[in-house]
Image (cartoon, rainbow, N blue to C red):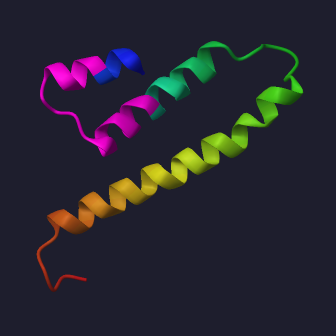
Amino acid sequence: MAGSLLCLAALDALSLELFFVISLIGFLVVLELTAPLNVTPQWRRRLRWILALAMVGFVAIVVRRILAILPPGVI
């Protein structure tokens, strides 16, 4: 997350939405790469709630961007 923050700042593209999406992608990658093969520990089951909240935030960002692109009067 710190690396993505530095890269976004260096590219002068730093926004909260973009940082959230990049952090979510990084979280998903780390979640998949550290997944155990046979047994799921109790603490990993709790990550579903965090993932669900993050997905709700992602959907809100996507809907907001789509509404900004659409011309007025379409919806």
What is the number of callouts on the image?
Answer: 0
Residue occupying the far bottom of the picture: 73
The correct choice, above or below, for 65 with respect to 52 in the image is below
Q: Residue at 53% of width from left, 27% of height from top?
A: 27
Q: Nearer the viewer, residue 67 or 50?
A: 50
The correct choice, above or below, for 64 with respect to 14 in the image is below
Residue 59: give x, y in percent of width and height. 44, 55
Which quadrant of the structure image shows residue 20? Answer: top left
- Compared across the picture, whether 29 is left or right of 66 comes to right
The question of residue 10 being in magenta is answered with yes
The correct choice, above or below, for 51 with respect to 64 in the image is above
Which quadrant of the structure image shows residue 17? Answer: top left
Residue 56: give x, y in percent of width and height. 53, 55
Overall secondary structure of the magenta section: helix
Q: Residue at 48% of width from left, 52% of height from top?
A: 57
Residue 71: give x, y in percent of width and height. 11, 74
Q: Residue at 47% of width from left, 34% of height from top?
A: 24
- The quadrant of the picture occupied by the C terminus is bottom left
- Compared across the picture, whether 31 is left or right of 39 comes to left
- The quadrant of the picture occupied by the N terminus is top left
Q: Which residues are magenta?
A: 6-23
Q: Residue at 35% of width from left, 14% of height from top?
A: 3
